Image (cartoon, coloured by chain):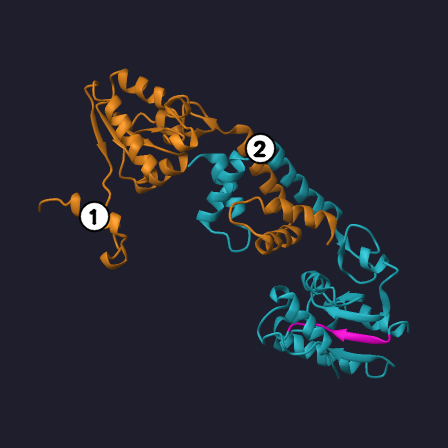
Chain colours: A cyan, B orange
Amino acid sequence: MIGPLEKLIQALKHLPGVGEKTATRYAFYLLNASPDETQELIRAIKDVKQTLRLCSACFHLTDADPCAICADERRDVTRLLVVETPLDLMAVEKTGSFRGVYHVLHGVLSPLDAIGPEDIRLAELLERVKAGTITEVVLALNPTVEGEATATYIGERLKEQSVKVSRIAYGIPIGGSLEYTDPLTLSRALENRKEL
Amino acid sequence: MIGPLEKLIQALKHLPGVGEKTATRYAFYLLNASPDETQELIRAIKDVKQTLRLCSACFHLTDADPCAICADERRDVTRLLVVETPLDLMAVEKTGSFRGVYHVLHGVLSPLDAIGPEDIRLAELLERVKAGTITEVVLALNPTVEGEATATYIGERLKEQSVKVSRIAYGIPIGGSLEYTDPLTLSRALENRKEL
C-alpha cells in the first residue's frame, strides 16, 4: 500500500460507521477530486473547529453569541423547549412547529454512566426559568429510560415555579431517537404534548 | 442551520454514497473530535493531493518513482498483469498470488463514452511488451462489456509479439452458490469448465 493513501484511509476510518472499504472509496474520491473541492472540505473542517461554540443563553452550537434563534426577536421567549443535543434541536427546528426558544442540556441524567445533574446544563435551565419570562417549558427528551428519568426530574425541580411543564407526546416510537424522526411525526408529538 | 456546520455537511455530501444524514453524522463527529485528529485528517488529505503521482513504469499510484512494486528486485519482471485501476491492482496485490509486475490502464475502451485507445495507457503497455523482457501478459480486466472488449483488443494487438497472453478466469466465486449466481456468470462457468 502507498504511504500517504494508507494514512488517509486510516484517518477516514475514524468516521462513525466507516470501515476499510468505505474509507478506501472516500480516499480515492478525494484523490481524484479537484483541488478546489478538497480545499473546500479542508476549510469547512477548520471553520467548524475554529468558529463553532455554544450559545451562552441556550447552549446550542453557534458561530455568533447569542445564536441566531436566541437573537431572533420574532421568537416567543415565554416558551422554552428542552432538548438533549444540538442535533435534536435542529430536528425540532426543521419541523417549523415551534416558534419559542430552546435549551440544550447536552446529555441526560444517567446514574449508570455517572452523569448527574451537574454534568449537564440543568442548573442553567433552572436559572432561566427562575428569571421569570418563561411561562411554559416543553420537555422534548428522547423516549429512553434516561430521557424519561430526566424529564421526571426536571418536572419535579420546576414544580415550585409558576410555569407550565409539558412533555412532547408519545408518537415517537419508544427506543427511537429524535434525530431520525420524520418531521410530521415530530410535529404531531409537539401538538400532543401533555402537561406533567 | 448554523453556517459553518452546514458548509461542512455540504462538503461531506460530495463523498460517494453520502447523503444528508450520513454527512451530518460525520460533521458532528469531526466537530467533537480532538484537534489532533482533525489535523491528522487534513494533513492526510493534503499529502495525498500533493505527493501522489503515477509510476512512470506501471502507472500505479505512488509517492516515489518508480513505485515500490516496480523497484522491488524480487518481483518477476517477465510476467505482467494488466488492470483497469489502482484499486484493482491493490485487490490483486492483497491476494499475494501474483509476484510479477503490473500495468494500470486507467480505464477501458468505451466507444459510447468516447474513450478510445489513446485515452488509456495502452500505447505504454504495447511499448513495454515490445521491449522484450515480458514473456507473459495476464489480463485482469473487469468482466464488463467494456472490459471484455478491451481484453480482446489488447489480445489482438499483442498477437504479433512473441508473448503469452491470458485472461483471469470468470466463474462462480468461491463460497458462492449456484442458486444465487446470475445466469451469465453460470453459463461462463459452464463454458470454462476444466477437465479433472
Amino acid carrying label 1: it is: Ser
Which residue is farthest right? A132
The number of discs equals 2
Q: Residue at x 51, y 55 (%)?
A: A17
Q: Is residue B175 left or right of residue A193?
A: left
Residue B141 in view of the camera:
no
The quadrant holding residue A188 is bottom right
The quadrant holding residue A93 is bottom right
Q: Is residue B1 left or right of residue B53?
A: right
Residue A139 lies in the magenta stretch: yes
Per the rendered image, the range of residues in magenta is A135-142
> What is the spatial separation of the Cα atoms under label 1 and label 2, in whole angstroms?
42 Å
Amino acid carrying label 2: it is: Ser
Question: Which residue is disc 1 drawn over?
Answer: B187
| Label of residue A9 in the image | none
A171, above or below B149, in the image? below
Chain letter of the residue carrying label 2: A
